[in-house]
Image (cartoon, rainbow, N blue to C red):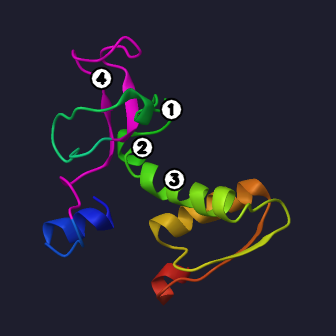
Amino acid sequence: VNFRDVLNVLGAYPGDPGPPGADCAGVWGERSCQDTSVGEAAFGFAAGSLGTAVLAVTILMPPKPRDMAFEEACTTPTVFVTVQMALQQASLMSAGDSLLVHAAAGGVGLAALQVSNALGCQCVGTAGGSAKRT
């Protein structure tokens, strides 16, 4: 469940958010296309994925890494795509750049720290409370 889903079920999302759920992980079922195998693990984006079955587009559902649990895989798509768009496409961050990450203890903040460190950036993060700073 991400923040958009919370706003959606509370009726506080501006406009039509669509059905709850987007980030997901699971296995391809019987109706999979020729690019997938029944039982193959995948993760990514599928609208309305807060349920036991969903219709997904294969290009948005790459194979799940074997060393990543389903619970981990379903938390990564939105936060890492957000970070990739912000750091690598919008701001063109590269090795040696400095980055201040606000709310570094949250999902997008943690992803930003991971990606920026992998790019060789110098990172500083903020967190909301003392429990998040330790």
C-alpha distance separating marks 1 and 2:
8 Å
Q: Which mark is residue 28?
A: 4
Disc nearest the viewer among 3 and 4: 3
Type of amino acid under label 3: Val
- Going from N to C along the chain, the mark reached first, 2 or 4, is 4
Q: Main secondary structure of the magenta part?
A: loop
Residue topped by disc 2? 73
Badges 3 and 2: C-beta atoms under 8 Å apart? no
Q: Position of residue 26 (x, y in %)?
A: 31, 33
Q: Quadrant of the C terminus?
A: bottom right
Type of amino acid under label 2: Ala
Q: Which span is picked out in magenta? A: 16-45
The front one of 51 and 133 is 51
Is residue 43 found inside the magenta-colored segment of the image?
yes
Residue topped by disc 3? 81
* Residue appearing at x 54%, y 69% in the figure: 109
Badges 1 and 2: C-beta atoms under 8 Å apart? yes
Indicate whether 133 appears above or below 1. below
Is residue 27 found inside the magenta-colored segment of the image?
yes
Type of amino acid under label 1: Pro
* Residue appearing at x 19%, y 76% in the figure: 12
